[in-house]
Image (tube, rainbow, N blue to C red):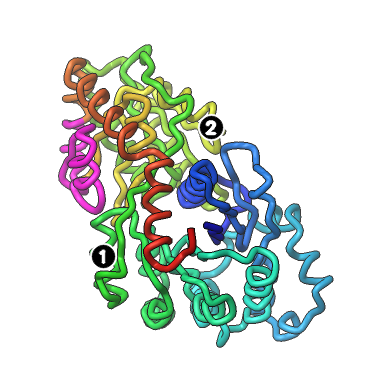
């Protein structure tokens, strides 16, 4: 089966959705499928060297999308100009300023993109559809998320093949948009969802969340848990008690919350040697938070015990994981999954996560951690301390969680699940 996976890139930092999609495509190839990853907006930032199928041209290039939103002239420019703006090096430079788009501009552009052939970027959508139809010729097209549903109608009409849409974290972005674009975006997504043959939710929690908000038939929504490439991941032996964080170094992932819990924990002399190690992607828009966190650590006199490592590669990420005693990413929004939980468990590191969103589900299926009441910093500090002082329990949770990941949360098991959904919706084997 030939599967085209359409995935937005970030241009300059690792993104969980990109890493998930690339692991999926790689595993699909290993299962014998002809899978390709088609980058949209910006070049993807991957953890492993690109393969032949990872070198597809970029469509819906970020600069073209923005310029066509702002100026009618660019909706009629010749292909030579458009290809220039789609050059990888230009898009990477543009990505450095991606966070500077004002909220109302982002809202307007989101609505326009969701309107597809009725939006201002229809020229770019036609190029993508033409390439898929005449060059890629897939049996199934998979969208990385529901924010791409503006392409659904044209793709299904022109290609006549099943279209699958993954559901993974769109609600947080959409709900952050100011009105009226928030409501307009949800209206457009709900309307365009009717063009889709099937949905893949990354957790049962998120399946329930999105079928309610999209108003789609529940029978069209299939849960296929995310999986990871566990190559090189193994338990380590931390030199000293270390609380780890592995996610985007931003507000909504809870870095500030974890910092506050760490400071509370350090007030107890029992944890005088405890460390905080925060690893993850960071962009220029995250700098104010990182500066504030550093100030808090210094004011509390514990800055020497905290290390922040932004934008690490896979090797350094695994090294960091193997040095952690326990992981906590106190996400403040409804996390649809949380790949970092799997990555930590693959290295034998148990987790302490809030008791909401997908985390109770992950705990049920992995047995690799404990939960705390969402938003309760004191409870978070208490749970972290309980695991740091109980080596046997920490080891048992890590071993149980690692075994679960290796059994049912690998990139292979994810690919098998996705392939099964593609086949049941009409993909040819």
Q: Is residue 87 left or right of residue 102?
A: right
Residue drawn at x 40%, y 20% is 323
Horizontal side of 94 relative to 341 (left or right) equals right
Where does residue 117 sit, x and y in percent of width and height? 57, 84
Q: Image height check: is 89 above or below 217?
A: above
- The verdict on residue 356 being magenta is yes
Residue wearing tag 1: 209
Q: Nearer the viewer, residue 247 or 160?
A: 160
Q: Nearer the viewer, residue 374 or 130?
A: 130
Asked which secondary structure carries label 2, the reply is helix
Image: 424 above or below 230: below
Secondary structure of the residue carrying tag 1 is helix
Q: From which residue to which does the magenta span run?
A: 355-383
Q: Residue at x 64, y 49 (%)?
A: 54
The image position of residue 311, as x and y in percent, is: 55, 38
Outermost residue toward the right? 80
The quadrant in which residue 7 appears is bottom right
Side of 361 where 304 appears, left or right: right
Q: Dots 2 and 1: beta carbons under 8 Å?
A: no
Q: Is residue 7 visible?
A: no
Disc 2 from disc 1: Cα separation: 32 Å
Question: Residue 225: x percent and y percent?
Answer: 33, 49
First in residue order: circle 2 vs circle 1: 1
Q: Is residue 113 above or below residue 83?
A: below
Within-10-Å neighbours for mark 2: few <14, some 14–19, many 20+: few
Q: Position of residue 12 (x, y in %)?
A: 62, 48
* 179 within the magenta span: no
Q: Is residue 310 above or below residue 34?
A: above
Mark 1 burial class by Cα count in 10 Å: few <14, some 14-19, many 20+: some
Q: Is residue 398 visible?
A: yes
Query: For the point 36% across and 60% down, which residue is it?
Result: 200
Q: Specify the label residue 314 is tagged with.
A: 2
């Amino acid at each position: 089966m030939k599967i085209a996976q359409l995935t937005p890139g970030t241009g300059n930092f690792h993104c969980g959705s990109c890493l998930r999609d690339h692991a999926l495509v790689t595993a699909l190839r290993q299962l014998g499928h002809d899978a390709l990853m088609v980058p949209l907006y910006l070049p993807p930032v991957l953890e492993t060297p690109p393969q032949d199928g990872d070198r597809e041209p970029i469509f819906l290039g970020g600069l073209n999308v923005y310029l066509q939103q702002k100026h009618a002239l660019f909706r009629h420019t010749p292909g030579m100009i458009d290809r220039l703006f789609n050059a990888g090096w230009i898009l990477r430079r543009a990505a450095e300023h991606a966070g500077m788009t004002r909220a109302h501009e982002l809202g307007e552009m989101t609505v326009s993109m969701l309107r597809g052939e009725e939006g201002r970027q229809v020229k770019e959508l036609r190029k993508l559809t033409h390439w898929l139809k005449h060059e890629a010729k897939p049996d199934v097209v998979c969208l990385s998320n529901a924010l791409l549903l503006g392409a659904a109608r044209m793709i299904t009409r022109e290609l006549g093949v099943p279209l699958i849409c993954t559901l993974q974290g769109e609600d947080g972005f959409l709900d952050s948009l100011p009105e009226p674009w928030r409501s307009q975006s949800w209206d457009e997504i709900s309307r365009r969802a009717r063009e889709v043959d099937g949905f893949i939710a990354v957790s049962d929690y998120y399946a329930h969340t999105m079928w309610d908000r999209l108003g789609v038939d529940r029978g069209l929504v299939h849960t296929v848990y995310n999986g990871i490439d566990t190559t090189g991941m193994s338990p380590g032996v931390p030199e000293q008690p270390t609380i780890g964080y592995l996610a985007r170094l931003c507000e909504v992932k809870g870095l500030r919350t974890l910092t506050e819990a760490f400071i509370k924990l350090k007030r107890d002399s029992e944890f005088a040697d405890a460390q905080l190690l925060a690893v993850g992607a960071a962009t220029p828009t995250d700098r104010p938070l990182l500066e504030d966190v550093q100030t808090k650590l210094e004011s509390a006199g514990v800055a020497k015990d905290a290390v922040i490592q932004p934008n690490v590669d896979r090797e350094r990420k695994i090294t960091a994981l193997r040095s952690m005693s326990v992981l906590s990413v106190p996400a403040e929004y409804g996390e649809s999954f949380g790949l970092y939980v799997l990555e930590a468990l693959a290295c034998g590191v148990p987790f302490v996560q809030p008791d909401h969103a997908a985390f109770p589900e992950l705990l049920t299926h992995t047995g690799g951690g404990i939960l705390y009441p969402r938003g309760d910093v004191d409870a978070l500090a208490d749970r972290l301390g309980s695991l740091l002082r109980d080596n046997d329990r920490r080891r048992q949770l890590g071993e149980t969680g690692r075994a679960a990941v290796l059994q049912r949360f690998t990139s292979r098991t994810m690919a098998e699940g996705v392939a099964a959904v593609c086949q049941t919706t009409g993909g040819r084997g």
